Amino acid sequence: MGSYYLLTKWQTHLNLRMKNHLVQMREKKRHSRKVIFLSIVAGIFVVLGIIIISTVAGLLKANEETDSTTEIPDEVIVECPEPWLKINSSCFMFLSGDCPLGCPWFTAAELCRNASGILAEPKILQYWRT
């Protein structure tokens, strides 16, 4: 009975060692899977960063090229047909005959549209001062 007890004790010891070894192997596999997963995620972020940076750089370069080729002339040359008048590089027509005593704003805007124009409104405060 003594040898059976030693054998059983030895088998129990071997079983514990094997279980510990299996547990360690599983933990190593889990760890390596985590490392692989994190490496893939990091790689995806790096690729996305490169794409975003290259897109922004391309847009900035295109914007610089557009800005450098677009030149605004100091004075625009405007030719006004008859009966339009040229005032400050714009064409104006006075329709005083249609409303000799003045018109409401809506009526004046409609008359201007009928004459292929828009109702002129001062944009700068100095034009309102008399």
Image (tube, rainbow, N blue to C red):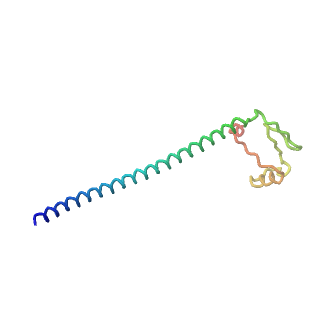
Image point (19%, 59%), residue name: 13
In the image, is 36 to the left or to the right of 89?
Answer: left
As rendered, which of 106 and 64 lies closer to the eye? 64
In the image, is 16 to the left or to the right of 57?
Answer: left
Image point (84%, 41%), residue name: 85
Q: Where is residue 103 in the image (x, y as percent from the top left)?
A: 78, 52
In the image, is 83 to the left or to the right of 37?
Answer: right
Q: How many callouts does the rendering have? A: 0
Image point (60%, 40%), residue name: 57
Quadrant of the drawing holding the N terminus? bottom left
As rendered, which of 18 and 128 lies closer to the eye? 18
* Quarter of image, res 66: top right
* Quarter of image, res 65: top right
Q: Is residue 55 above or below residue 10?
A: above
As rendered, which of 76 and 42 lies closer to the eye? 42
Q: Where is residue 58 in the image (x, y as percent from the top left)?
A: 63, 42
Q: Is residue 45 above or below residue 73?
A: below
Q: Where is residue 89 in the image (x, y as percent from the top left)?
A: 79, 37
Q: Which residue lies furthest to the bottom in this view?
A: 1
In the image, is 42 to the left or to the right of 96?
Answer: left
Quadrant of the drawing holding the C terminus? top right
